[in-house]
Amino acid sequence: MKIKVGFMSLILLSGLTLAACSDEEMDHSEMNHDNPSSDEVRSLEVDLQAPESIKSGEEVQFVAHVTSNEEDVTDADSVMFEIISGEESLDMIEVDHSENGEYVLDYTFDEAGDYKVISHVDAFSLHTMPEEFVTVE
Ligand SMILES: [Cu+2]
């Protein structure tokens, strides 16, 4: 299951990054001098979506929807999901862009319990890291 999902996101990426890259390059370099709007202040918002119910041993999805100035961010510098139990950081997983500014983590909790999930997002030299508390049954 893991492998299949990874493979699918690779296919998605190969199609999407090309379009995303050319957009962003225009924003950042070519258009920089003639387009006054590229000087505007960038925001970095991350909407972290956790599943409503989680059972141990079952794969679930966490989605970090990344936007800047109300536009989807398809090429964030880095999106890392951190899984924390109590004081202990259990996992730190980097994920690629899926589509429409969404960065998706497929994750399976091995044990029931209370966890904190943080999505660390870097883009436009900004860092935003929303967190969600989840209970695994
Ligand atoms: Cu962070």
Image: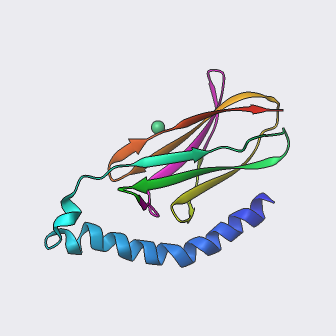
Q: Quadrant of the N terminus?
A: bottom right
Which secondary structure type mostly characterizes the magenta part of the structure? Answer: strand
In the figure, 58 relative to 13: above or below? above
> In this rendering, would 1 be left or right of 23?
right
Residue at (55% x, 78% y) in the render: 15
In-front residue for pair 46/98: 46
In-front residue for pair 85/51: 51
Q: Is residue 76 magenta?
A: yes
Instruction: Tell me residue 133's x, y (percent).
Output: 65, 31
In-front residue for pair 112/48: 48
Q: Quadrant of the C terminus?
A: top right
Residue at (43% x, 42% y) in the render: 128
> In this rendering, would 33 be left or right of 77?
left
Residue at (71% x, 44% y) in the render: 51
Instruction: Tell me residue 40's x, y (percent).
Output: 22, 57
The region drawn magenta spans: 71-92
Residue at (44% x, 60% y) in the render: 73
Instruction: Tell me residue 48's x, y (percent).
Output: 57, 45
